[in-house]
Each structure stands twice: as C-alpha cells, then as structure tokens.
C-alpha cells in the first residue's frame, strides 16, 4: 500500500530531514513544499493521505493552510509541526481539527514515527471501508438492473431523473418486477445531499405487509422501554435507523388508515416520537415507497389517504411486467445463468442451447421476473449436459411442473393465457416480427400448430443487419460454427459500433437501434472507453 505524505515547511533543512526519514519506508511517497500555497496547489493532482504542516510559514501560514486542507477533505489527517515555544499554537491547531503535533528539536523524530505509523493504520482502514463501499454500490448499482427493452429504457431515464433531487419516489409494479432493485439503485446512486456525510448512508426496508398491525407503529417510530407489555428495552424505529440514508417503504398499500395518518405527520414534520416517549426526534432521509396496488383507486375508495398519496407519490416510477418486455427475456436468462454460476462455480460451463433459448422466448411469461429466474436456475441444476435443453426448463412436456405447464397448455389449447397482452407478435417498438411454428418440445397434441414470435436481432439486443455498424458483426453463421454466448456478441457489437462511430456514443446508439441511456450503460458495463 502506498501512502502519499506531504511535508510542508519553509525551513528547507528541516523539511529535508523529515522527508529523508519518511522516505526510508518503501510504502511512503513523500512530497515536500515550501509553503501552504504550494501544497494546496498540488491537492487535485496528487491528493495526500497525510500532511505534516509547519505552523509558522510566510504567506497564508500553517493555520490557514490547515483550514483550507479541511475544506478539501474534512477527515484528512494533518500533523502540525511547531517550533519550541509555540506549543500553545499547536494546541490551538488541534482544537481547529489537526490530528496531532510534533515539536522541532525535541522528541520530534521518534514521535513522528509513532504518529505516522498510527495514521497509516487509519488510512488503511478508511481505504478498506471505501473499497467495501464501492463493492456494495456496485452490487446494488444500475448494472444490477437488466434489460434493454424500450420499456426498461424509459425506466432508466426516470431513475436518472430521480437522482437530481430528493423528491419522494413511488415505484409501482406487479410483484417481482424489480421494485426493490430499483429502490436500491436510486439509493446507491443518489449523490450526497447538502451537508450529508460521505457515502449513501443506510438503506432501511420496512415491509408493511410482513409486520403485524399492532407492531407497525413501534416498527416505524420505535418505542421506549416499558411503553407496552413486552417492551423490555428501548427500540429504535426504522425512521431513526434510516437517518442519513433511505427509508424504503415496501408494500405501502398495506398500511392501515391510523398508521397512514402518523406516517403523514412524520413525513411532513420530518420528526417522530417513539411510542411511549415524549421527546421529538428529527430525521433526514430519502423516502422511497413501492406497491403493487392501484393506490389511486384506493384513494378513491377511501382506503388510502389522499394527502399521504401526494406526499409519497411526488415522483412515480412505473415498472413494466415481464410480459411487456419480451425482448429482455433472454438477456435476463443469461444474466441469471451467469449469476448462479458465479455463486456455484460447479455450474460455470452451463449454457442455454438454441432450442432452450427459443422455448424461453416463446413461453407466455406473466409479470414476475422471479419465475424466469427459478426456471433458469432449476434448469442449470437438473440438466445433465453443459447445454441446457428445452426439456430441462420443465415448462412444457410430460415432466413440466406447475404453474408453468398449465400456462403453456392453456395458451396452446386456445384458452386465454394469464398474460394481459397477447403473445408476442410484435417487437416492443410496435414493428411486426416473423412467426414460426412451435418447436417439437412444445407439441401439445393440438391439430393446428400454435404461432409464436421469433426474436428479431433487435429483440435479442443485437444490431439490425441494415445498420452499417451491424453488418460486420451480424453475418449469418455457418452451421458448424460454435455457438457464441449472446453477451459476447453484444459486447462486440457495442465495441464495434463505438469504434466505427469514432467514439460518439450518441451515433453508435442510433446505429445499434438502442437508446442513449442504454448505450452509456453498456459502455460502462463492458468498460469500453473512448
Ligand atoms: N430488471 C431486472 N433485472 C434483473 N433482475 C431483476 C429485474 N427485475 C427483477 N429482477 C429479479 O427478480 C427478483 C425480484 O426482484 P425485486 O425483489 O426487486 O422485485 P419486487 O418488485 O420488489 O418484488 P415484490 O413485489 O415481490 O416485493 C430479484 O431476484 C431480482 O433480482
């Protein structure tokens, strides 16, 4: 680990003495400066981990330099160097935020070693925290949301807009459409609000459907010891826990009217009182709610307070069910395949065969993405070969299991499928796509073959052959060519388009037939740089 140290002292002899000693440690990168101004000028290009700062210097001097260093990075460790007889100034500096001080000509060099050693420990720790924070943010970042369909494109645009301010966001969508995923992405990508400390703060979930009614108030606002039977200790509620971060109110449509009134009051006044307590406690957090209910209908029927509706739904984000994003099915399936193989490396060679991919595409998925996920993960487990076949999916055929089997049979026998929209005969953007007969694996015993949609290249997230960027990568493969994973093709298509379009993401997006936001996301995902 390299630690960058600044030695700032106009006494060149003393500065050289310190830097010579510090340089002996190979982990140290020492920069010396003769004035505060010089050191401040270097901050952006080479930010320090630790500063040794003389108090008495010409120009702005040590104290003012300290103040400006703190503006640059509030938790930057700064050790003041005081001349003999100016120890009282050093103490003043520590009151002003300096970490420690050494006195020239006394025990300075020994103390220097100890101080630097301790601070290095601190720097190492804060780097580790930073690294972990980055990992968490990545895990819950935008990249976790998968899908390039026009419907998801709109969702990405809305998410980006929610990041501009601190309005309450209400995410609506059927069960399993990714509401929590989107809430986490908003939380982890929201820039720190005015005065907030570093990082996104805590993400606290309250699932209103999962908590017994009688415990709801205490869950939200906390309680004091002895405030009711069973309250053996003080309990800190979710609002307080979310302070400085995000409170995610899941299934908000399940709240009863009494609690709705209390929630409204808390949100309006930005303060709460614990059950059985009298102290009012201020909180500051972003509020995101989610529901799969039609809350406006609930407002009309008196089940949901209108004033709370306006308070929570300042920025509504509607998530599409899977049936409205057919072209995402394979992208999602591959993502689940990769995710499961990462979790269980023994499955890392498993891949979707062409017939299985077609079967997934033609299956009438309803809304819940979890269904697709469990079909894919189960297929990985039960398939005997590396290539997953339609039979491994267990969504049709003699071994198919509910609810998947019933859906296929209902659809095939002409009964209304559970989806609200018809099976895919058009791509997401309204253009028609060719149809084909159901593959053998979907034979239902019906005399007439069922017609289902065949994915177009655009449906698969691939460039349409008509675009110049596409022709180079979308040539028809020979029958004996090995199958290339879809993700590799996508990466190549994006890379190629970006190069051909001279690094213009906008033009490349146009050529690929995808939106700008998706293009930027893919460039980031594949780490393609201009
Ligand atoms: N767009 C998506 N990209 C990747 N995974 C998704 C997407 N949408 C949903 N999922 C996956 O589906 C599962 C359900 O997602 P999530 O819990 O966010 O949905 P939800 O709408 O909050 O569900 P519920 O209404 O049941 O609480 C998770 O495993 C999630 O990873």
Image (cartoon, rainbow, N blue to C red):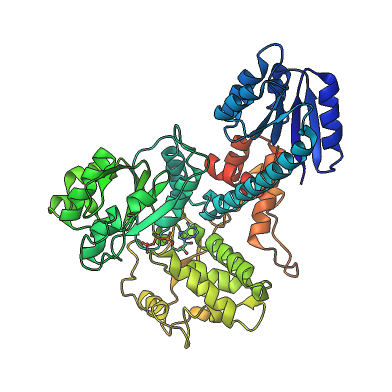
In the displayed structure image, the side of residue 108 where residue 372 appears, left or right: left
**Quadrant of the image where one finds ligand 1:** bottom left
The residue that appears at 67% across and 52% down in the rendered structure is 491
Q: Position of residue 437 (x, y in %)?
A: 50, 72
Q: State how many labels appear.
A: 0
Q: Residue at x 23, y 55 (%)?
A: 275
Seen as rendered, the residue at the extreme top is 59
**Is residue 385 rendered to the left or right of residue 24?**
left
Q: Is residue 289 visible to the viewer in this orientation of the structure?
A: no
Which of the pair 103/514 is nearer the observer?
A: 103
Question: Which quadrant: the C terminus?
Answer: top right
Viewer-proximal residue among 58 and 237: 58
Rendering coords of residue 34 (x, y %): 77, 18
Q: Is residue 74 left or right of residue 46?
A: left
Q: For the view shown, which residue lies furthest in the left direction? A: 302
> Image check: 76 left or right of 109?
left
Tell me which residue sits at (12%, 52%) in the image. Answer: 302
């Amino acid at each position: 680990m390299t630690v960058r140290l600044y030695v700032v002292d106009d006494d060149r002899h003393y500065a050289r003495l310190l830097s010579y000693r510090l340089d002996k440690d190979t982990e140290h990168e020492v920069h010396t400066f003769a004035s505060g101004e010089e050191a401040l000028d270097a901050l952006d290009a080479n930010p320090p981990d630790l500063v040794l700062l003389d108090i008495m210097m010409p120009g702005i001097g040590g104290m003012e330099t300290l103040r400006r260093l703190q503006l640059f990075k509030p938790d930057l460790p700064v050790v003041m160097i005081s001349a003999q007889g100016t120890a009282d100034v050093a103490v003043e500096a520590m009151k002003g935020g300096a970490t420690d001080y050494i006195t020239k000509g006394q025990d300075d060099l020994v103390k220097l070693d100890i101080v630097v050693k301790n601070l290095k420990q601190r720097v190492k720790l804060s780097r580790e925290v930073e690294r972990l924070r980055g990992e968490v943010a990545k895990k819950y970042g935008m990249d976790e949301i998968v899908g390039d369909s026009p419907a998801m494109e709109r969702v990405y645009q809305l998410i980006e807009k929610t990041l501009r301010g601190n309005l309450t966001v209400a995410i609506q969508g059927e069960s399993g459409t990714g509401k929590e995923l989107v809430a986490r992405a908003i939380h982890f990508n929201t820039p720190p609000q005015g005065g907030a400390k570093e990082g996104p703060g805590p993400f606290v979930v309250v699932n209103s459907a999962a908590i017994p009614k009688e415990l709801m108030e205490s869950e939200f606002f906390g309680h004091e010891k002895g405030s009711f039977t069973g309250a053996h200790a003080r309990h800190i509620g979710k609002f307080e826990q979310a302070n400085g971060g995000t409170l995610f109110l899941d299934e908000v449509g399940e709240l009863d009217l009494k609690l709705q009134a209390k929630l409204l009051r808390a949100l309006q006044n930005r303060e709460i009182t614990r059950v059985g307590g009298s102290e009012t406690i201020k909180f500051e957090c972003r509020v995101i709610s989610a529901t799969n209910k039609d809350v406006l209908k609930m407002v009309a029927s008196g089940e949901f307070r209108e004033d709370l509706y306006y308070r929570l739904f300042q920025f509504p984000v509607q998530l599409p069910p899977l049936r409205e994003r057919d072209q995402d099915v394979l992208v999602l399936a591959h993502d689940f395949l990769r995710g499961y193989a990462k979790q269980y490396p023994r499955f890392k060679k498993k891949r979707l065969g062409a017939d299985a991919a077609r079967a997934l595409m033609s299956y009438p998925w309803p809304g819940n993405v979890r269904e697709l996920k469990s079909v894919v993960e189960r297929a990985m487990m039960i398939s005997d070969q590396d290539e997953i076949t339609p039979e491994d999916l267990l969504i049709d055929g003699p071994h198919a299991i509910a609810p998947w089997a019933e859906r296929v049979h209902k659809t095939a026998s002409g009964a209304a499928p559970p989806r609200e929209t018809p099976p895919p005969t058009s791509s997401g953007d309204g253009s028609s796509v060719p149809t084909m007969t159901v593959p053998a694996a979907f034979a239902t015993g019906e005399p007439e073959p069922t017609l289902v949609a065949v994915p177009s290249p655009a449906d698969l997230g691939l460039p349409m052959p008509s675009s110049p960027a596409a022709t180079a990568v979308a040539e028809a493969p020979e029958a004996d060519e090995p199958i290339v994973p879809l993700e590799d093709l996508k990466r190549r298509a994006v890379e190629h388009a970006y190069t051909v379009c001279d690094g213009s993401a906008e033009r490349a997006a146009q050529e690929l037939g995808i939106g700008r936001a998706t293009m930027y996301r893919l460039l980031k995902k594949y780490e393609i740089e201009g």
